[in-house]
Amino acid sequence: MLKMQDISKIYRTDLIETYALRQFSLEVSAGEFVAVTGPSGSGKTTFLNVAGLLEDFESGSYQLDGTDVRALSDDARSRLRNQRIGFIFQSFNLIPDLNVQDNVEVPLRYRGLAAADRRERIDSALELVGLASRARHMPAQLSGGQQQRVAIARAIAGDPAFLLADEPTGNLDSLMARQVMDLLEQINDMGTTILLVTHDPELARRAQRNVHLIDGQISDFRAYEPRAAASGGADAVGAALA
Amino acid sequence: MNLHLRPILSALLRNRTGAVLVAMQVAIALAVLVNALYIVTQRIEKMGRPTGMDVENIFVVQSAGFTAHYDLKSSIQQDLAWLRSLPGVIAATPSNAIPLSGGGSSQGLTIVPGDRTRDNSFGYYELDEQGLDALGLHLVAGRNFRHEEIEPPITVDDAGRFVGNVILSRAAAKELFGDQNPLGKPVYDTLKHQATVIGIVDPAMNSWVDNEHSDWVFYMPRLTSSLYGGVRYIVRARPGERDAMIRLAEAHLSTSNPDRVIHFVRPMTYFKDLSYLSDRSMGIYLLTVTGLMIAVTCLGIFALATFNVATRTKQIGTRRAVGARRADVVQYFLVENGMITSAGILAGCALALATGYYLSLQYSLPRLNLYYLVGGVLVLWAVGQLAAWQPARRAAAVSPSVATRTV
Amino acid sequence: MLGYYVRLALRSFSRNPGISALMVLAIALGIAVCVMTLTVFHAMSGNPIWWKSDRLYAVTMDNWDPNNAADKKHPELPPPLMTYKDARYVAASRVPMRKVIMYTVDATISGAGTAPLRTPTRATTGDFFAMFDAPFLYGGGWSAAAEDPPPPSIVLSRETNEKLFGGINSVGRVLRWNDQEFRVVGVLDDWFPRPRFYDLNGGSFSPPEDAYVPFAWGPALSLQSSGNTECWKPETINNEQDFLASDCVWIETWVELPDAATHERMQTVLDNYWAEQHRAGRFPRPRNNRLTDVGQWLRDMQVVDNDNRVLVGLAFAFLAVCLINTVGLLLAKFLNAAAITGVRRALGASRRQIFTQHLVEVAILAVLGAALGCLLAALGLAAVHHMYSAAHLGHRGGYQELTHFDTVGVAWAIVLAVVATLAAGLYPAWRVGRTPPAVYLKSQ
C-alpha cells in the first residue's frame, strides 16, 4: 500500500539546514489504521505532507500502491491525491464560501465525474457522516464537530484508498472528538487505510499500530499499547528502523 | 528618530513582486506626469501669448459679390458707413484676411532691393485708416495711416502693385532692421517695389498661430480686393456690445445688397479658438489621462499597503505587544511605502528623461526642463505617502492581543 | 469544468466586491483611453481609397527657388501643388488612364429659387468622379473630352441639392453659378473620404466641396484659388495671363496609372518635359519629378500629426499602468485566498486546473472591463466630438470627423481586452498555481 524507504527531507534557509525527516522508512499495508505520534517539531507534519504528495523529499523512495511517486509529474501526483488519498485537517479547511455539498463536491469536480455520479457520491458520503440534512448549510452555520464530519465526507467521497488525518480532533471538545474517532474507525472497518497523525496518546491508542517520531526518525520506544488488531490488520508488517 | 531601515528593507525584499509592481507604476506615472506637464505648460504659454488685438470685442463679417452688377468699392463704402454708424461700434475696417484664423496672405520683404539671402515671409493685412483701431493694436512708434493714403483695391490688371506706406510689427521691424530705428526707412517687396515704414505696433500676430514667427506682420493702407474670395470687415465693438452688434449686422447686411452674399458674421474668438483647438484638446487630454494615471497609481499603492497590513496583522500585534507605539507602526508602513515609491521615482527619473529626450528628438519638442522633474518627484512622493496613510493608520489600530490568539 | 470555474469566479467576486470593481474599473479606464486614442489615430491614418491606392498618383515637380526648398523642413519634397502650365501639360498627356487637375474656388449659386447660397466649388476635370470613385445619386459627370471650351455643367453634392432643390432629381435644371448659367448634370450621393486625400491643403478632414464645375471655368472667369497659392519667384503679374504663366503653384494634379509600364512611361513623360523646360531656363533646382501613390502621399503630407502620436504613446503608457495595477491587485487577491487554493491542491487539483480557474476569473474581469471600457470610450468620444463641434459652430470638418465610435473601436476594445487578460492574468494565475499547498494547510 504505502512504502517509504530511507526518506530524507531537509528545510533550507539562507543560514541553516534542518532535517525534518532523516532516513525515514515505513510500510503500511492495506486496511491498516496507523497512528503517527511524536512531540511537536518531530517531523509529524512533514511526514504527512510527504505521504500526501504535498511536498517533495530529498532522497529515498516512496511507493504508493506500487507506484514510485518520485518519478511522477506534478499533474500525476495531483491525480493520485485526487483519486487515492483523502485529507482531514485539524482546522477542517472547509472552503468558507461553498456550502456543505459543494465542499464535498470539490475533489469529485477535479476528478471530472459526471453530475449524476457526483450527486450520488455526495449523498452517500454525507449520509455516512450523518449530515445529509445539512447539505445546503454554509460551513459557518455548523459546529466544529459537524464541520469536521463534512471534511471527512469530502475526504471519503472520492473512495480513496487511504485517509491522511492530521490532528483531526485537535480543535474539538472530547465528545465531538469521540464521534469523529468513531467515524474514522467505521471508515477503517470498511477497508480504507488510515494514517492518523497526532500528539494525543489517547487517540493513538485507538490505532492498530503506533509509530513514534523523534527528530525526524522513528523511535522504537513504544509509549502506548495499540488497540487489539482488527480484522484485516492482523498480519500488518511492523515499522522497521533504518 | 529610530527608523530601522534594514529590517523594513529585508521584509520588502522577501516579498518583492507587489512592491516591484507598484514601483513600476510610480516610474511610468512620473515619466508621464513630468512630460505631460511640460507639454501642457508650453501649450498654455502658446495660447496665452499676447496678440496685441482686442480679440474679445472684435467680430468679422465676410461678404462676397457674385453678380456682374456688384461694385466692390461702393459696396465697401456703404457697408463701412453703416457699420461705423452703429453706436456699439468703436471702429471698422475692410481687410483681406482675419488675424489668428489660419487663413491669409504673406509675402517677403527686404531692406535691400532684390536681396535674396534672407528667406522671410510676413503675414500682411490690407486695412484702412481705422484698421489699427478696429484690431485694437497699439502703435508704439510713428503714426497711423491717413484717410488720403488708403489706396484703391488691386485688380487682375495690376496684381503686383505695392503700397506707399507700411506699418510693421516690432518683431518684423527687428527681423528687417535689427536694432536700427525703422521709421522713415524703405522696405521692398520681392518685385523691388518700395514702401516707407511709418509706424510700429507691438505686440501683434498674423494668421498662423503655429508658425514659428507668428509675430512677423505688416499692414498696408489699401482697400482689399475681392480677388481672393470676398471682403472681410473687422469690426470692434464696445465692451459687452459684441453679440448685439453681430445680430444687427447679420440682419442688415444679408439684405442690404442683392448682388452679394454674407458668408458669415462671427466673433474673432471663434477663429482664435479654432486655431488653438488642437492645443487646447491636447492639453485637456494630457491632463485628464495623467490625472487618471496618478489616481490609478495611488490605488495601486493603497492596495499594496492594505494587503501588507492585512497579511501582517499578527506580526503587527506582536510588535505592539512587545512595546511598539501606534506611531511606530504608522511610521513602519510609511517608511516601507516611501522606500517603494522612492525606488519607483528613481527609475521614473531615468524614464522621464529618456522620454523627454525621445520626444525632443522625434517630434522636435523642446528639451525637458529639469524643474518639472523636481516638481514631479515631489508630487509623486507626497501622493504615495497620502495613499499609504489610511492603511498605515489601520495597521496602528491592530490590537496587541492579536499576538496571543492562535487563529 | 468551465462552468464550474465561472461559478467559482462569481463567488470570488462576491467575496471581494470592492477590489473586483476596482480591477474592472482599472481595466476599463485603460481600454477606454486606448480605444479613444486609437479610434482617432486609426481614422487619421486611414487610407480612404485603399482599393486603388496603388493606381492613383499625385504628380509633383520641383519648380521652386534654387536657394530654398518649398518646405524647409522637408527639402526633399517638391511643392505639393503645380503651376498652371505644368498641370496643363500633364492633363494633355495620353499616357495615364485617367488624369485630373483641379483647385477650389469660392462661388455663389443663385437663380435656383432660393436665396443666394455660398458654394465652395471644386474646378476639376471630367475624370475626377471615376478616378476617385465618387458615387452619383442622379446623373453623372461631364465628358472629359468636351472640356475645351468648357460645357456649363455642374455637379452638386447631395447636401447642396437638398438645399437648392429639396433633394429631388435636379439633373437638367439650370442655375446661376457666380452669375453664369450652369446646367445640373449630376448629383453626388453622400461622400466624405477621410482624410480628403486628393486635396489636403484646406485641412485634412474637411468635407468635399459643395459643387463641381469643369476646370477651365476657373481661369476663364479669372477665379483665384480659395486654397493655397504659393509663389517664390519675383515676377511681375499684371493680368490673368501673367498669373497663369507664372511659377506660382495652386493646382492639384493626379493621374491613374494601371500598371508598372504606364507608371514608367509617365515618369519618362515628366522627365522629358522637365529637361525641355530646364533647357528653356525653368526648374532651377535638381530634377525631382514625383509620382506619389496615395499611401505615401498621406505620409508625405503628414496627415497624422505629432500630437496624435504622442497621445497614442500616452494611451499605451496609461494602459500599462492600469494593467500593472491589475496584476498587483490580482496577485494580492489570489494570494490572500492561498489557503483555499492549498485545500484545493490537497484535494487533487492540478496546477493547470488552479491556473485555469484563476485565468477564467481574470477573463471575466477583462470582459467586464472591456464592456465598461467600450461604454467609457463611446462617452469619451462623444464628449470630444461635442467639444470639436462646439468649436466649429456645428459645421462639418476637422477633428470631429474622426471621433466616431464604430466597429473599429469595438474591435480595438476586444483586442485590448484579450491583451489585457493575458498581460494581467497570466502571472498571478501562474504564481498562485505554483504556491506549495502544504504551507497553508496547517492552522498554526
Image: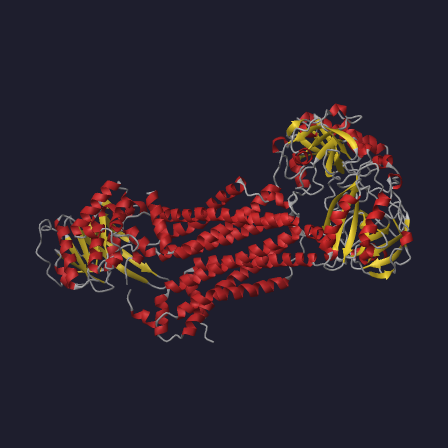
Q: Is residue B174 above or below residue C176?
A: below
Residue at 13% from the left image edge and 54% from the top image edge? A185
Residue at 50% from the left image edge and 47% from the top image edge? C375
Estimate the x, y position of residue A87 in percent, counting from the top left: 23, 53
The number of callouts visible is: 0
Q: Is residue C32 left or right of residue B59?
A: left
* Colouring scheme, one of rainbow, by chain, secondary structure, one colour: secondary structure
The C terminus of chain B lies in quadrant: bottom left
Residue C87, located in which quarter of the rendered image? top right
Estimate the x, y position of residue B190 in percent, counting from the top left: 86, 46
Q: Is residue A138 above or below residue C44?
A: below
Estimate the x, y position of residue B277 in percent, counting from the top left: 66, 51
One can see residue A88 in this view:
yes
One can see residue C94 in this view:
no
Residue B172, located in which quarter of the rendered image? bottom right
Q: Between residues B345 and C206, which one lies in front from this camera angle?
A: C206
Q: Is residue B280 left or right of residue A19?
A: right
Q: Is residue B56 left or right of residue C347?
A: right
Q: Is residue C93 above or below residue B385?
A: above
Q: Between residues C429 and C189, which one lies in front from this camera angle?
A: C189
Q: Is residue C416 above or below residue B300?
A: above
Q: Between residues C135 and C86, which one lies in front from this camera angle?
A: C135
Q: Between residues C364 and B132, which one lies in front from this camera angle?
A: B132
Estimate the x, y position of residue B175 in percent, counting from the top left: 82, 55
